[in-house]
């Protein structure tokens, strides 16, 4: 099959160091996203075009919505909550705080209201330096998958029976059998192998039809994979480092994509002036509402 090509529009020329973790807040019709190395939470309102940023004082890998309002965060030193935005961070569980070379990275809530996020070395290439963690609504932390090099995208199948997961340095997208009641993972399997010349597998989201949208960092593309593994759509961006896709808009028909400029040479920045911008496309497929943290 020939994959359909999709173009993007720039919605916010944010110059984010490491734009990441977009999540649509259906209560406010805004997009929450993070700038990991910019140490900030952002809230973008497409109705006004305004973006508000809040400094959180250390690298923040991910933010997720809470059922009671506010956000749960995966920061350099562990998990914290914000009861409102802007507001005071409240630490709920430190993670690997004795490993200053590590930070938390991508995270997302599961259908039972737990928050999952993994760690990585700041360099991203220290083998098995990180792990994947689960924060339960009572703030207990479980180290679920050890020996991860660069913990990244995650999401759940439409029937909640599988969790998709990426350790970027494996160049793979894997699945686990997911037990919704206990939050345990078993039976790791590889569902996609990404060739190195097609980028590093980074953030991902599943749409309402079970298609998997994967940011292929370094390639300037986000691709939609069918359950068979075939690529049926390719989103092309004017920058190489696409980091994470997420559906938003009142009917979840907009696909937002974060990007970054961290580590780029002066020459590369000149060639890609929009690196770090927030992009959007209308892919003709709808997404699903984000799950909220129950704690
Ligand atoms: Ca990422």
Image: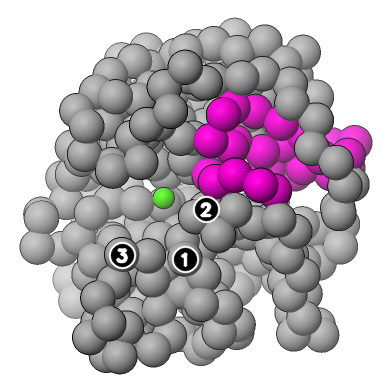
Q: For the residues carrying marks 3 and 2, which lies nearer the camera in this image?
A: 3
Q: Is residue 270 left or right of residue 105?
A: left
- How far apart in space, not on screen, are marks 2 and 1 (Cα)? 7 Å
Q: Residues within 10 Å of mark 3 (few under 14, many from 20)?
A: few
Location of the C terminus (image quadrant): top right
Neighbor class of circle 1 (other Cα within 10 Å; few <14, some 14-19, many 20+) is many
Circles 2 and 1: CB atoms closer than 8 Å: yes
Is label 3 in a helix, a strand or a loop? loop
What mark, if any, has residue 36 been given in the picture? 2
Mark 3 or 2, nearer chain start: 2
- Counting residues from the start of the chain, the first of labels 1 and 3 encountered is 1
Q: Secondary structure at mark 2?
A: loop
Dividing the picture into quadrants, the one containing residue 46 is: bottom right
Q: Position of residue 156 (x, y in %)?
A: 51, 36
Please indicate whether residue 3 sits to the left or right of residue 210 in the image: left
* Quadrant including the N terminus: bottom left
- Left or right side of 180 for 258: left
Task: Pinpoint residue 210: horizontal percent, then vertical percent.
Answer: 46, 49
Q: Distance from label 3 to label 2 (Cα)? A: 13 Å
**Which residue matches tag 3?**
263
- Residue at 33%, 35% (x, y): give it: 121
Is 78 in the magenta?
A: yes
- Label 1 – label 3 distance at C-alpha: 8 Å
Residue denoted by label 1: 17
Q: How many marks?
A: 3
Q: Residue at 60% of width from left, 13% of height from top?
A: 141
Q: Is residue 70 visible?
A: yes
């Amino acid at each position: 099959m020939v994959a359909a090509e999709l173009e993007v529009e720039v919605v916010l020329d944010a110059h984010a160091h490491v734009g990441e973790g977009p999540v649509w807040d259906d209560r406010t019709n805004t997009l929450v996203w993070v700038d990991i190395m910019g140490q900030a939470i952002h809230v973008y309102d497409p109705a006004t075009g305004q973006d508000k940023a809040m400094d959180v004082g250390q690298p923040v890998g991910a933010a997720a919505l809470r059922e009671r309002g506010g956000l749960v965060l995966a920061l350099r030193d562990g998990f914290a909550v914000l009861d409102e935005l802007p507001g005071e961070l409240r630490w709920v569980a430190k993670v690997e705080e004795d490993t200053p070379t590590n930070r938390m990275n991508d995270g997302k809530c599961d259908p039972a209201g737990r928050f999952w996020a993994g760690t990585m070395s700041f360099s991203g290439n220290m083998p098995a330096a990180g792990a994947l963690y689960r924060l339960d609504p009572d703030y207990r932390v479980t180290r679920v998958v050890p020996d991860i090099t660069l913990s990244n995208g995650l999401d759940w199948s439409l029937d909640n029976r599988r969790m998709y997961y990426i350790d970027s340095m494996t160049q793979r997208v894997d699945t686990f059998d997911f037990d919704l009641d206990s939050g345990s993972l078993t039976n790791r399997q590889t569902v996609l192998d990404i060739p190195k010349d097609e980028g590093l597998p980074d953030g991902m989201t599943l749409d309402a039809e079970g298609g998997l949208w994967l940011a292929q960092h370094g390639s300037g593309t986000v691709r939609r994979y069918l359950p068979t593994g075939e690529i049926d759509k390719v989103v092309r961006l004017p920058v190489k480092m696409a980091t994470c896709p997420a559906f938003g808009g009142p009917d979840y028909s907009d696909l937002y994509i974060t990007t970054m400029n961290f580590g780029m040479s002066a020459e590369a920045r000149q060639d890609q002036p929009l690196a770090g911008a927030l992009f959007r496309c209308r892919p003709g497929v709808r997404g699903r509402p984000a799950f909220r943290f129950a704690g």
